[in-house]
Image: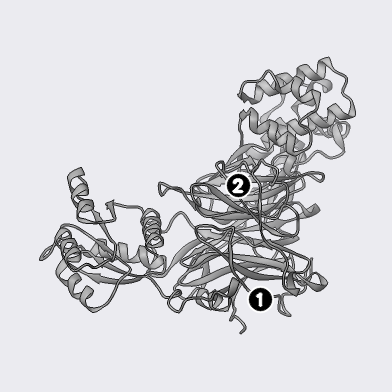
């Protein structure tokens, strides 16, 4: 049976009007000196006229263009000594003009806007029931096929339709903050990953550094080595690798007055000089309920592929670090949205052909053995397999949207289901593709390709952003229930009749505001909610039907939470009870747990913490 794919009207195409300004050094230092001489030779009047015209032409296209010009002027001041110019005697206006000549515009998405992923926006305020605010990331490609990461913001409504925020023409490049502290063991391990661990030059540069060392200490050792040793081809390779790894670790920060669509993560290091590829963003929930957003991506400098990890909590400040380990040497790594059995879990395809899973105690170190979980099985994936983003947690297992490559290099999207507690086990696969390029999506830079870097669940539907022929992007949604129904389970097992039904939660809460907030949070996770305003009405509901979980306040009229729990114990009702209350003394908590409550959550509670705790309880009950 074919799965019903609902394509949406939202499309994103390359837009040549989206430009940033970059430093520009035409023809090397010799020509740069000539340019500086020519600008210095201008009269004050002519210099002012050229600067004013330049500002008129470009100030409305970029934020604070004068700051950019001055920064680019600073980058060429090292040439002034040879030219015998004293910067003190150069006017601010002429400095800006010099900077302008070492500036060029770069259209970040003129060639392609594709390979999207989607996550919940950190800000979920002021939304109606059934709505969700999301951030979509894209791989934007411009001149020279250099890729960066762009973003768009939207609201998903209860019918799974997008309302995207208007897109500003202005684009902001973040301030770069170089990190200056490194762990020696990680640094040496990455050199080992690059097959350079046994080179004598590394010992001479790294050996006397502390286990944690600073960037300036590393540079001091590099300078000493260069002064004492002949720089052979082999030594040059080592120096290049050490600088490559050091520069790959940094932070970037965007101004708080930028809209989501104005932020672009553009290559800033040598490791990324040829582009940032295929960021797979995921909303990650820590064991304590804290939320972080991670993304794996591939940095490329024309010679070496370097897997990188992005971390953010607000999409304004991003920390970037290398991913280490023998199995972190290829594209297509996708982090699970939470730890599994106390360890970070990651999908990978380090052999370029099959799907693997690996586990680690450190989020950026993947040196343990990877477990093969899927090889090409069906004709539409005979060439190779891969993941299309982080797994989606469902009540039945981890749903992984996959991509397969078949005849005539046709990329399609499929799916597999992994065991929740042991994701090395593949429970079920999809025999036929879920999404293939239709006739309007087949033409582009790379024909016949659909590809995604991450999907989410919303209102019991999988929301799939996908690239079309490596050129532009579209969106689709598909019923989670329908996908699960179409899976073929391994070893003769089949999907249980009731496994796809919504979990029923009885919410017992007398405060209308609290009940409304809790109801909205629980609906977002796909639960079926029944509300009782006090313990007495909760008993009436329990006499009518069975529930998977009871979430109850304590202090209520008619019958409080403790009395409700005593009734549940007397009637031998096995439904787990979770107390949620502002009364948070140790005595209250102990009393509730002694009476048989499985969890005690104090108000106010973060929505994500509540969702995670309830999900864990229901999994244990199951």
Query: Which label was assigned to residue 63?
Result: 2
267 left or right, relative to 500: right
Judging by the rendered image, the residue that carries numbered circle 1 is: 431
Vertical order, 157 against 30 (above or below): below
User: Circle 2 sits in a helix, a strand or a loop, which is it?
Assistant: loop
Q: Quadrant of residue 509?
A: bottom left
Name the image colouring: one colour
Q: Residue at x 66, y 50 (%)?
A: 370
Ranked by sequence position, the earlier of labels 1 and 2 is 2
At which x and y percent is residue 361? 55, 42
Q: Quadrant of residue 150?
A: bottom right
Vertical order, 393 against 46 (above or below): below
Q: Residue at x 66, y 76 (%)?
A: 431
At which x and y percent is residue 65? 64, 43
The crowd level at tag 2 (other Cα within 10 Å; few <14, some 14-19, many 20+) is some
Q: Residue at x 71, y 37 (%)?
A: 48
614 left or right, relative to 43: left
Looking at this rendering, what residue extends furthest in the left direction? Answer: 558
Q: Quadrant of the N terminus?
A: bottom right
User: Circle 1 sits in a helix, a strand or a loop, which is it?
Assistant: loop
At which x and y percent is residue 389? 61, 60
Q: Which residue occupies the foreground of this view, 145 or 594?
A: 594
Q: Residue at x 67, y 41 (%)?
A: 325
Q: Which residue occupies the foreground of this view, 183 or 131?
A: 183
Looking at this rendering, what residue extends furthest in the front direction? Answer: 491
Which label lies toward us, 1 or 2?
1
At which x and y percent is residue 156? 48, 68
Does any portion of residue 44 appear in the rendered image?
no
Query: Which label was assigned to residue 346?
Result: none
3D distance between C-alphas at marks 1 and 2? 51 Å
């Amino acid at each position: 049976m074919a799965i019903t794919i609902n394509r949406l009207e939202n499309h994103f195409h390359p837009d040549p009007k989206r430009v940033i300004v970059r430093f520009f050094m035409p023809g090397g230092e010799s020509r740069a000196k000539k340019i500086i001489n020519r600008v210095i030779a201008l009269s004050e009047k002519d210099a002012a006229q050229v600067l004013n015209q330049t500002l008129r032409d470009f100030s409305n296209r970029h934020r604070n263009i004068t700051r950019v010009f001055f920064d680019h002027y600073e980058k060429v001041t090292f040439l002034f000594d040879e030219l015998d110019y004293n910067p003190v005697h150069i006017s601010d206006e002429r400095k800006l003009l010099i900077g302008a000549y070492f500036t060029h515009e770069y259209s970040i998405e003129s060639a392609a806007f594709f390979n999207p992923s989607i996550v919940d926006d950190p800000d979920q305020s002021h939304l109606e029931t059934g709505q969700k605010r999301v951030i979509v990331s894209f791989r934007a490609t411009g001149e020279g096929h250099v890729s960066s990461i762009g973003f768009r913001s939207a609201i998903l409504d209860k019918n799974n339709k997008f309302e995207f925020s208007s897109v500003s023409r202005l684009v902001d490049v973040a301030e770069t903050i170089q990190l200056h502290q490194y762990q020696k063991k990680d640094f040496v391990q990455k050199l080992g990953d690059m097959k350079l661990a046994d080179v004598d030059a590394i010992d001479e540069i790294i050996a006397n550094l502390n286990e944690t060392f600073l960037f300036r200490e590393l540079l001091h050792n590099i300078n000493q080595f260069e002064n004492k040793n002949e720089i052979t081809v082999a030594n040059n390779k080592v120096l290049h690798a050490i600088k490559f790894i050091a520069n790959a670790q940094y932070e970037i920060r965007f101004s708080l007055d930028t809209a989501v669509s104005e932020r672009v993560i553009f290559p800033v290091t040598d490791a990324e000089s040829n582009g940032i590829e295929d960021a797979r963003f995921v909303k990650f929930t820590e064991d304590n309920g804290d939320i972080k957003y991670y993304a794996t991506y591939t940095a490329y400098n024309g010679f070496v592929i370097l897997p990188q990890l992005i971390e953010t909590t607000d999409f304004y400040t991003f920390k970037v670090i290398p991913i280490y380990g023998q199995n972190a040497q290829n594209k297509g790594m996708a982090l699970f949205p939470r730890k599994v059995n106390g360890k970070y879990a990651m999908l990978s395809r380090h052999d370029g052909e099959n799907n693997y899973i690996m586990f680690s105690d450190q989020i950026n170190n993947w040196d343990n053995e990877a477990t093969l979980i899927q090889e090409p099985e069906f004709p539409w994936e005979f060439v190779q397999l891969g993941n299309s983003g982080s797994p989606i947690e469902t009540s039945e297992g981890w749903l992984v949207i996959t991509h397969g490559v078949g005849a005539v290099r046709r990329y399609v999207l499929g799916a597999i289901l992994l065991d929740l507690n042991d994701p090395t086990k593949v429970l079920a696969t999809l025999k036929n593709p879920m999404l293939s390029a239709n006739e309007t999506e087949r033409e582009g830079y790379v024909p016949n390709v659909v590809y995604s870097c991450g999907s989410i669940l919303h209102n019991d539907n999988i929301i799939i952003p996908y690239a079309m022929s490596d050129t532009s992007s579209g969106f689709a949604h598909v019923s989670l229930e329908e996908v699960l129904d179409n899976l073929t389970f391994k070893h003769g097992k089949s999907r249980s009749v009731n496994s796809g039904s919504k979990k029923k939660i009885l919410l017992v809460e007398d405060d209308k505001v609290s009940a409304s907030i809790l109801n909205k949070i629980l609906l977002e996770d796909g639960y079926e909610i029944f509300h009782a305003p006090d313990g007495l009405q909760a008993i009436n509901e329990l006499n009518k039907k069975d529930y998977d979980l009871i979430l109850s306040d304590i202090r209520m009229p008619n019958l409080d939470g403790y009395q409700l729990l005593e009734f549940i114990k007397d009637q031998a009702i096995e439904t787990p009870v979770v107390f949620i209350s502002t009364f948070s003394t140790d005595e209250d908590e102990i009393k509730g747990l002694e009476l048989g409550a499985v969890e005690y959550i104090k108000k106010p509670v973060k929505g994500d913490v509540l969702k995670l705790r309830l999900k864990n309880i229901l999994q244990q009950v199951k």
